[in-house]
Amino acid sequence: MRVFSMLWVLPLFLAGCGDKSAVSLSAHITNGVVTVDNGTFGASASGSFKLRLALGPEASASVKVTPQAFQLLGQANVLVVDQLPVTTSSPSTITIDKGGNQDVEFAFTGAMVDHDAACAGPLTFVGALDDSSGNSSYPVASGPVTPSCD
């Protein structure tokens, strides 16, 4: 009989188990492309990536996100480009509404690189975002990106 008398508690536990993504900001980098060219004065990289931002539907309010710096890492997290010279047509501060998402395209050209380090294997885009909910330096990263090298 004790088992049945405690069954009324089960719905309370289930209602309290929420998905964190329903209230928080999520960000990741997708569609990364990197091309490395040898030039007269050394190798340079160009490319693009998409920053995907989403805010859960149960968030208390919209959030303003400001991308900070982006870097390019090589194998074993070796720094290939310290400050990617990115450009975008989006505003410097991006507003994400509750339950909304937004993709922001970034491009870069002329980033000086060590050809061998950049072409040794997969690269990873990493960056930091600030948001109005108090998360400064919110980290963001891509999956592995295979560079196109000449």
Image: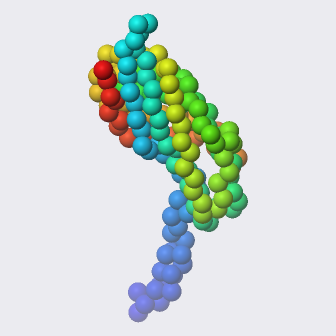
Residue in the picture at 49% in, 20% down:
111
Question: Is residue 64 rendered to the left or right of residue 79?
Answer: right
User: Residue 129: where, in percent of width, then height?
Assistant: 60, 39
Residue 77 visible to the viewer? no
Q: Is residue 104 left or right of residue 77?
A: right
Find residue 125 and report its image quarter.
Answer: top left
Q: What colouring does the structure picture have? A: rainbow
- Residue at left offset 56%, top offset 45%: 104
Q: 25 and 92: which one is in front?
A: 92
Quadrant where the C terminus is found in the figure:
top left
Where residue 18 sits: x, y (%)?
52, 67
Residue 24: x percent and y percent?
Answer: 58, 56
Residue at point 57%, 56% (across, down): 101
Q: Residue furthest top?
A: 41
Q: Would residue 13 be seen by someone viewing this image from the given angle?
A: yes
In this view, 131 is above or below 84? below
Q: Is residue 42 above or below residue 88?
A: above
Say above or below: 128 vs 43: below
Left/right of residue 41 with respect to residue 115 in the rendered view? right
